[in-house]
Image (cartoon, rainbow, N blue to C red):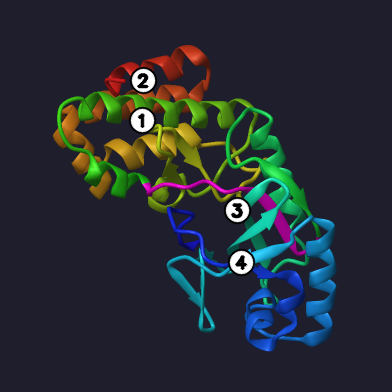
C-alpha cells in the first residue's frame, strides 16, 4: 500500500453529503467515477456511521490527498462516533468483489491483539483504528541520545512477539519479508502491524522467519539496526529460524529471540 498511515495534521472534514460533488466522489469511487455506484457507497458509509471524510496524507488520488493507495483499495481518514478512523475503500477496478477476505483476516489478527482494531465493514469499506506514527525505518532514523539501543531492542522484541502470535493461530501476514511499509511505530514506541490485505490462513505461516530476515539479514534496515545493537550472528540465526520453521513452538521462538539479542 503506497503512502502510510502516519502523522498528518487534521484538515477540515468534508461532510458525506458533499461527496456527491464529482471532484470528491471520484476519490470515493477511485479510479473510475460512476454516479450510481457513488450513491451505493454513500449508503454504505452511513451504515458505518461515517459523518465526514478528510482528504489528507502523502498520496494523491486524482488531485486530492489520501493516506495510501494500493491495487485493491485506497485509505482515507473518516470521522465517526469513535473519532478519526482509517477508512479502507475498495477500488472500482479491484480484482475482488468485496473486502470480506481482509475483514476476516483482520478479525483473526485482532483476536490475538495484533493489527488495527476493526470497527466495522461493508462490501466496499473497512472502518478501523487509525494508527499514527512513522514507518519502522523512519522511526529508527529519528532516534537520538542515550537509551536508543534499548528502545530499538524493546520495539523489535514486540514486533517479533506479534509475529509469534500470528504464527500461533496459523495466520500468515504475507508481506513481512519486505516490511518497510507494514510496521508503524506509535508515540510510546509500540510497533503495530498493518495491512492484512494479502494475509492467509491457507499458506503456512512464516511471520517470525520473514520479519527476522527483514530485521537482521540483508536489508537496509538490518544494517541500521546492527549499528545500534551490534551484528547478529547470521549463521546461528539462520539455524535458529530453521529449527523454528520445523517446529514453531515457544521454545524455538525463544531461541530466535536469544540469538537475535532480544
Look at the image and give the residue range highlighted in magenta: 123-135
- Locate residue 153, reporting x and y percent: 29, 26
Mark 3 secondary-structure assignment? loop
Q: Quadrant of residue 148?
A: top left
Which label was assigned to residue 13? Answer: 4
Of discs 3 and 4, which sits in the foreground?
4
Residue that carries the numbered disc 2 in the rendered image: 257
Name which of mark 3 and mark 4 comes first in the sequence: 4
Name which of mark 2 and mark 1 comes first in the sequence: 1
Please check the rendered image and state whether residue 128 is part of the magenta-colored stretch, yes or no.
yes
Residue that carries the numbered disc 1 in the rendered image: 156
Above or below for 172 versus 71:
above
In this view, the residue farthest toward the top is 251
Above or below for 162 versus 90:
above
Q: Quadrant of residue 209?
A: top left
Q: Quadrant of residue 260?
A: top left
Of discs 1 and 4, which sits in the foreground?
4
Amino acid at each position: 500500500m503506497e503512502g502510510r498511515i502516519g502523522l498528518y495534521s487534521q484538515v477540515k472534514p468534508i461532510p458525506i453529503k458533499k461527496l456527491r460533488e464529482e471532484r470528491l466522489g471520484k476519490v470515493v469511487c477511485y479510479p473510475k467515477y460512476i454516479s450510481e455506484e457513488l450513491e451505493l457507497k454513500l449508503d454504505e458509509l452511513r451504515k458505518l456511521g461515517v459523518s465526514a471524510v478528510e482528504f489528507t496524507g502523502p498520496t494523491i488520488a486524482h488531485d486530492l490527498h489520501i493516506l495510501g493507495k494500493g491495487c485493491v483499495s485506497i485509505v482515507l481518514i473518516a470521522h465517526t462516533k469513535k473519532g478519526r478512523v482509517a477508512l479502507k475503500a475498495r477500488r472500482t477496478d479491484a480484482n475482488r468483489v468485496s473486502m470480506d477476505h481482509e475483514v476476516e483476516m483482520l478479525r483473526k489478527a485482532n483476536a490475538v491483539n495484533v493489527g488495527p482494531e476493526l470497527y466495522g465493514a461493508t462490501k466496499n469499506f473497512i472502518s478501523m483504528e487509525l494508527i499514527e506514527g512513522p514507518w519502522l525505518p523512519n522511526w529508527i532514523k529519528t532516534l537520538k541520545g542515550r537509551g536508543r539501543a534499548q528502545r530499538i531492542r524493546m520495539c523489535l522484541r514486540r514486533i517479533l512477539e506479534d509475529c509469534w502470535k500470528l504464527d500461533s493461530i496459523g495466520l500468515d501476514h504475507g508481506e513481512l519479508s519486505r516490511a518497510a511499509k507494514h510496521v508503524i511505530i506509535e508515540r510510546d514506541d509500540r510497533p503495530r502491524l498493518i495491512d492484512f490485505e494479502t494475509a492467509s490462513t491457507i499458506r503456512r505461516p512464516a511471520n517470525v522467519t520473514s520479519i527476522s530476515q527483514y530485521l537482521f539479514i540483508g536489508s537496509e534496515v538490518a544494517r541500521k539496526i546492527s549499528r545500534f545493537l551490534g551484528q547478529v550472528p547470521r549463521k546461528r540465526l539462520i539455524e535458529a529460524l530453521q529449527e523454528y520453521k520445523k517446529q514453531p513452538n515457544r521454545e524455538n521462538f525463544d531461541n530466535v529471540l536469544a540469538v537475535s539479542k532480544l
